[in-house]
Image (cartoon, rainbow, N blue to C red):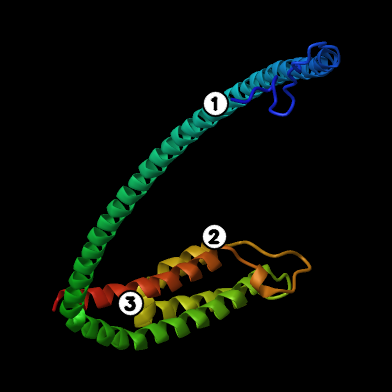
Amino acid sequence: MNNLNDPPNWNIRPHSRADGGDGSRWNYALLVPMLGLAAFRWIWSRESRKEIEREREAYREQTAAFQQDLEAKYHATISESRRAVARLSLELEKEQNRTASYREALISQGRKMVEERKLLEQERAQLVQEARQLQPLRGAYLHCLQGEEDWQQRARRLLQEFEDALTERQSIYCSRLLPRGQRLEMEKSLLVRASVDPVAADLDMVSGLTDIFKHDTHCGGIWNTNKRQNGRLMWLYLQYWELLVELKKFRKVEKVILEK
């Protein structure tokens, strides 16, 4: 086999010359470079292996550090993801609870509306039935109102006439120029009419007029020219008689309906 220290064409063997002079010198001359080359190759191989080992060690350290960093980031990401999942789960549970409460409220409200609708339908049916029952009474009521309209119109005309007469009577009472006898004659005339008129008799106007003539002494003032500012009690009685006219009308209608 070939040997690096003994290449095929470099193996210099001494000649078998008897003197042995030049062959030995050439042999030693070639041996020294070969030894140097072999030593260089051995040193280079050793340093290369050391360099490779150092690079491998550095790579292993970098890989280990990178792996640790990745593991740390992985664990941090997992922890954050777990916290996010827990937070989302809590929010989802709250939202589900709110949705359930809202759904229950809607269901309760719907049931309540259904019950109210049933009650309204029952009340409507009852009102329709009552309206049908009251239809004849309504006709009688309208007929009675129409019958009392004439009496009410006569009462309004009578009250307007008495208002004008009482206004003039109070103006005479407050005047220092007009004679007292004129006022007394007007009072007597009003009392006679109130006693003979059937509408005035229904309103019992005689007693009211007597009270006015006896106690209403109010005057608007010395320089007053507005007749409607004179008197106080007379205006209260006039309002009272107007309300009494309305009241008597409905009482008469009520009496007629109840007798049916």
- From what the image shows, is residue 60 above or below residue 211? above
- Say whether residue 129 is left or right of residue 225: left
Q: CA distance from mark 2 to mark 3?
A: 30 Å
**For the residue labelled by badge 2, is the local secondary structure a helix, a strand or a loop?**
helix
Q: Amino acid at mark 1?
A: Glu
Q: Position of residue 141 (x, y in %)?
A: 25, 81
Q: CA distance from mark 1 to mark 2?
A: 113 Å
- From what the image shows, is residue 16 above or below residue 150? above
Q: CA distance from mark 3 to mark 1?
A: 102 Å
- Say whether residue 184 is left or right of residue 99: right
Q: Amino acid at mark 3?
A: Lys
Residue 59 got which mark? none
Residue 71 got which mark? 1
| Camera-side residue of 191 and 15 | 15
- From what the image shows, is residue 144 above or below residue 34? below
Residue of label 3: 249
Circle nearer the N terminus (1, 2): 1
Disc 1 residue crowd, few under 14, some 14–19, many 20+, Cα 10 Å = few
Residue sitting at x 41%, y 66%: 207
| Camera-side residue of 82 and 252 | 82
Q: Position of residue 116 (x, y in %)?
A: 26, 60
| Camera-side residue of 178 and 138 | 138
Q: Amino acid at mark 2?
A: His
Residue sitting at x 31%, y 74%: 250
Q: Quadrant of the N terminus?
A: top right
Disc 2 residue crowd, few under 14, some 14–19, many 20+, Cα 10 Å = few
- Say whether residue 119 is left or right of residue 170: left
**For the residue labelled by badge 1, is the local secondary structure a helix, a strand or a loop?**
helix
Q: Nearer the viewer, mark 1 or mark 2?
A: 1
